[in-house]
Each structure stands twice: as structure tokens, then as C-alpha cells.
């Protein structure tokens, strides 16, 4: 073996040094990446989705659609007003409701309800929906997003906590999709 | 003075390399007004750094405080409004100058051998500039920023498989909130500017090492084997030192641009903020800043089925195309006079973006949310009408038809103007269209009583020019015999 190709003592130390740094960097990268991805990896069902009350049934007259607001179930001190959210509550009859996200199923702009024509209209790109949330016209590819709701002790609640977006929903086994 | 300079240079040893860089020979005809956009972009970038640092001294990147701190900048802090305006107008100018620089480089064939990597780094610089523009719009945490983030999330969510994860990564949680603003702050203030500075240095280094692109002469072809020696020959034979032969034009233009930014800032003032970022206030029609307006227009005009593929594949193809450009045509003709396809491509893109941006100025695709209550039916459409037809005009307003259909130039433009609809559609066709909708119109069958439909159609039938008869179905008269009498009279 020629002298040049032999591993010298200093060369070995340098390589061990590089390896050592690599190991430490990897060890540090794990918590950093976990921190960065924490908003993705936190499970949906048990972490941020929960039932929030919208008000008593009597606040929503039968056959009408009213705007209701609720506070996001998960709040950080720096959130300010952004955790207050609006939704459209349609009381069909009795305890039968439909609760729509205000976000247009096209690109998320806030839709407005016009009781006279029974339509939701979006100011951004002109998406229009019927009173039951079905798509009427415009660019949306689907109807309005609906929150799961329940009526208990005369109180209407919805399962909320996630911004509804038109993309494919994350497939979480066995978990009912919220706001689908 | 000279002694102090020498003391420093003995330790820094920078004088020689700086002088060499400044006086490196450039081809004489590149000392041109066409070659000033790159340096102007750099100068505006420095302005953005300085004004950005000043803003960061007051701005609070918190969902609860950001809007208030912007108000304080606008109204309480001495000249806060001007620094905000400088930063806002600086960003507009920077996007514009970077684009002009890119077009110039493309038309002059400067991306060809051996400057491929300079071009590629430039493409990344463009993407980062746009990233700064979007993230900066988010930091102006107002209604437009809030709903703009929702639009960004809606687009990102359509990525197959990864969509929901990308949305949560982008928003820093399941909803748009404080964490969203904080991470865009980190991007806008640390991550992207850091990368920008690094890439700008690389870009400049390559301009110095490889030399500025010579003025393209038709017929002088780039060949890998001979280009470098030809360029060297050119700078030796017909070269001038960059300083001062070329640099004075850069200096003049940079100062002019800075003055223009300052003038716009002083005259027009800062951008926003618009309303508080309160998602319970839904009476808002968010709109992006001007460099994304074309996208806003495109998203409303694409057919729904093409939208997701266009949104997801379009940018990838465009960026790949830009990155691959120097490899697809790295040699050959540089002059735009011999590259008609290049010139046409630029024209096509410029006209498309210009048209889309122009359209987004008056958004014909959006319903006018207040037209039904704010824009009355013009008098001339009601002269000499019957009670039934007037009732129909009322139905026309109350049922918000007006939000999408204009009459006498007022009202929405989402649907066709109805000034002469009776010429286009017969009574039966009108009834069918109102009740069943179609052609991008909602069906009104469930929301109109038969009496309302009758009145509405009676009114619509009066909408035809004075000298032009309304459309009629000839077969109907033949089939019904006395059809003429049964048809509601168009004019009493």
C-alpha cells in the first residue's frame, strides 16, 4: 500500500470528527423537524376538533338561515380575533339543521346569504349555492362545507376547529370527516 | 486619510480585488440604458431591507397586535406612514423591475452558454421576490390578508395526498390564527431575505466572473467551443472599464427609481391596512395585491374542471420551463431580431397578464352584492309598462337578479346584460331559463311563485330595443292557432 492512500492518524481523526458532527446534527435535527411539523402531526380527532355551542334552538327561526359566530375550541394568546369564526345556520324544521361554513368551496372567500332569492353568493369569483348548500353555479366544484351538528338540551352545537378547504380530506381511519 | 485607508487595507486586503471588479472590462456597447435593471433591482432590494428593519422596530408579529401596530405606524409614529409606504411601493417596484430585468435578459439571449447558472439563480431570485411579495401581504394582517391566506390554503389543499398536511404546515395549525402570522413573519424577515442575500451574491459573482452579456448582434452565434475566447477577444479589443464607463447609467437609473418609489410613497401613501382580520365580519370582497391580480382573474375564468390541474401543474411547468430554458437553447442566435418565437412568447405572456390584470380591475365575474338594493331599474325601462310588468321589475330587483345581470349599464356583469333579452329569448325560453337555470345561472324554480315568475317574465319580455321586435316562437302560433292573443303583449 502506497503512503498516499494510507489513512493517517490526523485523517482518521478528521473523519471521526465529521461523523461525530453528523451524529450530533441528526440528533438535533429530530426535535427541530418535529417542532416544525407539529401542526401537521398533531392528530385531528383528539387534539383540536371539539363541539362548540352556537346558541339555543330558539335563536334560529324555522325555515330561516342565520349567521352565527363561535370561538375556535383551541386558542393561543396571540390569536386575537382570528379565532372567532362565523357560520351559516339553517334551521329546516324542529331539530333538523344544516350548519354551513362561510368559506366558499372554491377558494374560501366568505359567502353571503340572500334570503329573498334563497341563494348564497360569493363575492370573489362568483360561486353561488342554493339554500341547502348545493352548488348552483360558478367555479366551485362542490356544495358548501357542512359542520356536523347536534342538538342537546335545546342547544345547537357543531364540531369545529379546522379551516374547511376544498382539497381531498386527510384519510384518518375510522374518524368521521369534519365539515365535509 | 490615505494613511488610514492603508492601515485598513493592510489588514483587509480588499482594495485590489475591489478595484479589479470595478474596472473589469465590459464590451463597449453594453454600457447601455438596457443594462440598468439588474442593478436597479439590487438597489430597491437594499431599500426594502432598510425600510423593513425600520418597520420591524414597531411592528408586532402577533395575530392579536399586528393590525393595531400597523395603525400605530400609520397614525402615531412619526413618519411611520412614510416608511410603510416606502416598503409597500418598494415591493411593487421590485417585482416590476425584476420582471423587466428578466425580459431583457431573455430577449438579449443572456441566459445562453456560459451564463446558464446565472439565469437559474435568477429564476430562484424571481420566485423569492414573489414569495416576499405574498408573505409581505400576509404581514399586513388585515381582512385581505386573512382571506388571502384562506385562498392560499384552498389552493394548497388541492395537492393530491399531501394537501391537508401542506395546509396545516402553511397555517401552523388547523385554522388561520396567530401561529400563521408568526410563521409568515419568520419567512418574510429571516428565511427568504437570508436566501435572497445569498443568491444575489451568487448571481453577482457570476456576472463578474463570466462577464456581462455582450450586445447581441444578429448572426453572431454562440458556440460552446469558441464563445469564451470570442468574448475575451471582444472585451480586449473593444472593452471599457465598467467603472466609470457603464456604471454612471446604473447610478442615474437607480437614483431615479428610488426617487420614483419615494414619490409614489409620499403621494399615494401606504397600502392599508383594510378592516381588522376578524373572520366574523363577512361583508368583504378580498382582493390580492397587483402582482397577483392576474391569478385572481384566471381563477374565476378557468372552467371548474380545469382549475385544479391548472393550479397544480401550471406553476410546475412554468418553473421547469424557465429552469430548463438555458439547456434547451444554450447556443445559437442571441439577437431578438432573429428569435421571433422568443419575442412572440414575451408578447403573448405580457398581453395575457395585462388583460387578466385589467379584467380584475372591475371583476365582471363577481356578483355585485348590493346591486339589488342599490341600483334601481332605470326609469326608461318602466315607461308605459303595465302593472304586471312593473310587478315583474320589482321581482327582478328583490330576487337579486340584478346582482348578476345589468340593466342600463348598472348591476352585476356575471350574467349577460338583459337590456335586450327579449330579442334573444322567447317567452317559453325565458320561463325555462328562470325556473331551471343553466348556463351558469342558478335555478329559481323553488324561490319564485308562479305569479312571481309570470310577472318577471312579463317584465323581461319588454326588454328589447324600440325598433326591434321581441323573439317569438313561430311554431307556437301555428300549434295554438290563437297564440297571438294568448301571448302577453310586449307593449301595451
Image (cartoon, rainbow, N blue to C red):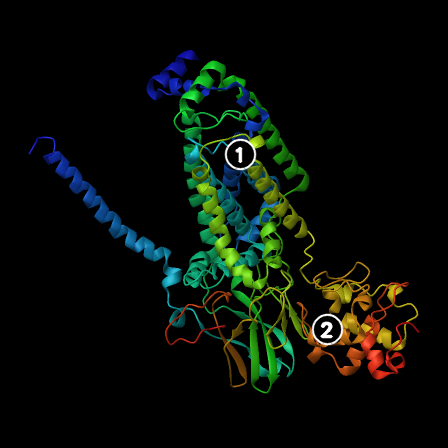
Question: How many numbered marks have been drawn onto this rendered protein structure?
Answer: 2
* Cα–Cα span, label 2 and label 1: 54 Å
Q: Name the residue at 42% across, 26% down.
A: B210
Q: Residue furthest left?
A: A1
Q: Secondary structure at mark 2?
A: helix
B323 displayed left or right of A114: left
Residue B433 in which image quadrant:
bottom right
Q: Secondary structure at mark 1?
A: helix
Using the image, determine if residue B64 lies above or below residue A68.
above
Do marks 2 and 1 share a chain? yes
Residue B428 visible: yes
Using the image, determine if residue B39 lies above or below residue B93.
above
In the picture of the structure, the residue carrying the numbered disc 2 is: B433
Residue situated in front as seen by the camera: B64 or B474: B474
Q: How dense is the environment of label 2, judged by Cα within 10 Å: few (below 14), some, or many (20 and up)?
A: some
B491 displayed left or right of A87: right
In the picture of the structure, the residue carrying the numbered disc 1 is: B41
- Report x, y in % for residue B471: 83, 70
- Report x, y in % for residue B419: 81, 63
A31 displayed left or right of B98: left
Name the N-terminal-most of marks 2 and 1.
1
- Report x, y in % for residue B345: 57, 42
Q: Chain of mark 1?
A: B
- Report x, y in % for residue A156: 54, 80
Q: Residue furthest top?
A: B2
Amino acid at each position: 500500500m502506497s503512503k498516499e492512500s494510507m489513512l493517517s492518524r490526523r485523517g482518521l481523526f478528521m473523519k471521526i470528527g465529521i461523523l461525530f458532527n453528523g451524529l450530533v446534527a441528526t440528533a438535533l435535527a429530530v426535535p427541530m423537524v418535529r417542532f416544525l411539523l407539529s401542526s401537521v402531526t398533531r392528530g385531528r380527532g383528539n387534539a383540536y376538533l371539539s363541539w362548540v355551542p352556537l346558541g339555543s334552538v330558539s335563536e334560529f327561526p324555522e325555515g330561516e338561515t342565520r349567521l352565527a359566530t363561535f370561538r375556535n375550541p383551541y386558542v393561543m394568546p396571540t390569536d386575537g380575533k382570528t379565532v372567532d369564526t362565523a357560520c351559516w345556520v339553517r334551521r329546516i324544521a324542529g331539530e333538523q339543521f344544516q350548519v354551513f361554513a362561510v368559506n366558499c368551496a372554491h377558494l374560501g372567500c366568505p359567502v353571503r346569504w340572500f334570503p329573498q332569492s334563497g341563494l348564497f353568493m360569493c363575492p370573489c369569483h362568483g360561486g353561488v349555492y342554493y339554500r341547502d348548500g348545493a352548488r348552483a353555479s360558478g367555479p366551485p366544484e362542490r356544495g358548501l362545507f357542512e359542520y356536523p351538528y347536534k342538538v342537546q338540551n335545546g342547544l345547537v352545537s357543531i364540531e369545529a376547529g379546522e379551516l374547511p378547504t376544498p382539497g381531498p380530506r386527510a384519510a384518518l381511519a375510522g374518524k368521521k370527516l369534519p365539515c365535509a | 486619510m490615505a494613511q488610514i485607508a492603508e492601515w485598513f487595507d493592510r489588514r483587509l486586503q480588499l482594495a485590489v480585488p475591489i478595484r479589479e471588479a470595478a474596472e473589469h472590462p465590459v464590451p463597449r456597447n453594453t454600457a447601455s440604458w438596457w443594462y440598468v435593471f439588474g442593478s436597479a433591482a439590487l438597489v430597491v432590494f437594499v431599500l426594502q431591507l432598510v425600510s423593513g428593519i425600520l418597520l420591524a422596530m414597531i411592528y408586532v408579529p402577533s395575530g392579536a397586535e399586528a393590525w393595531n401596530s400597523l395603525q400605530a405606524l400609520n397614525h402615531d409614529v412619526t413618519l411611520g406612514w412614510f416608511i410603510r409606504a416606502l416598503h409597500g411601493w418598494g415591493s411593487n417596484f421590485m417585482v416590476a423591475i425584476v420582471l423587466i430585468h428578466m425580459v431583457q435578459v431573455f430577449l438579449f439571449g443572456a441566459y445562453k452558454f456560459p451564463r446558464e447558472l446565472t439565469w437559474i439563480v435568477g429564476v430562484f431570485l424571481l420566485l423569492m421576490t414573489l414569495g416576499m411579495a405574498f408573505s409581505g401581504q400576509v404581514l399586513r394582517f388585515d381582512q385581505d390578508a386573512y382571506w388571502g391566506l384562506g385562498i392560499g390554503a384552498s389552493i394548497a389543499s388541492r395537492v393530491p395526498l399531501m394537501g391537508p398536511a401542506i395546509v396545516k404546515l402553511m397555517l401552523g395549525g388547523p385554522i388561520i390564527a396567530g401561529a400563521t402570522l408568526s410563521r409568515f413573519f419568520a419567512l418574510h424577515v429571516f428565511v427568504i431575505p437570508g436566501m435572497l442575500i445569498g443568491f444575489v451574491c451568487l448571481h453577482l459573482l457570476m456576472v463578474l466572473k463570466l462577464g456581462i452579456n455582450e450586445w447581441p448582434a444578429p448572426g453572431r452565434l454562440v458556440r460552446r467551443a469558441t464563445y469564451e475566447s470570442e468574448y475575451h477577444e471582444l472585451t480586449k479589443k473593444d472593452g471599457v472599464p465598467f467603472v466609470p464607463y457603464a456604471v454612471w447609467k446604473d447610478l442615474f437609473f437607480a437614483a431615479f427609481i428610488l426617487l420614483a418609489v419615494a414619490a409614489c410613497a409620499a403621494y399615494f401613501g401606504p397600502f392599508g391596512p383594510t378592516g381588522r382580520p376578524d373572520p366574523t365580519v363577512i361583508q368583504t370582497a378580498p382582493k390580492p395585491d397587483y402582482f397577483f391580480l392576474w391569478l385572481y382573474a384566471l381563477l374565476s375564468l378557468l372552467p371548474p374542471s380545469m382549475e385544479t390541474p391548472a393550479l397544480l401543474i401550471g406553476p410546475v411547468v412554468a418553473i421547469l420551463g424557465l429552469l430548463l430554458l438555458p439547456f434547451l437553447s444554450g447556443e445559437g442566435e442571441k439577437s431578438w431580431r432573429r428569435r421571433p418565437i422568443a419575442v412572440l412568447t414575451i408578447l403573448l405572456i405580457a398581453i395575457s397578464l395585462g388583460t387578466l390584470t385589467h379584467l380584475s380591475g372591475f371583476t365582471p365575474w363577481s356578483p355585485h352584492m348590493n346591486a339589488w338594493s342599490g341600483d334601481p331599474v332605470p326609469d326608461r325601462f318602466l315607461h308605459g309598462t303595465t302593472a304586471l310588468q312593473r310587478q315583474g321589475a320589482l321581482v327582478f330587483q328583490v330576487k337579486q337578479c340584478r346582482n348578476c345581470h345589468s340593466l342600463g349599464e348598472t348591476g352585476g356583469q356575471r350574467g349577460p346584460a338583459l337590456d335586450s333579452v327579449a330579442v334573444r329569448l322567447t317567452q317559453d325560453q325565458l320561463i325555462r331559463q328562470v325556473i331551471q337555470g343553466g348556463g351558469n345561472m342558478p335555478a329559481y324554480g323553488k324561490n319564485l311563485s308562479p305569479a312571481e315568475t309570470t310577472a318577471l317574465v312579463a317584465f323581461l319580455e319588454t326588454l328589447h330595443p324600440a325598433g326591434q321586435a321581441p323573439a317569438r316562437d313561430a311554431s307556437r302560433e301555428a300549434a295554438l292557432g290563437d297564440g297571438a292573443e294568448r301571448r302577453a303583449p310586449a307593449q301595451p
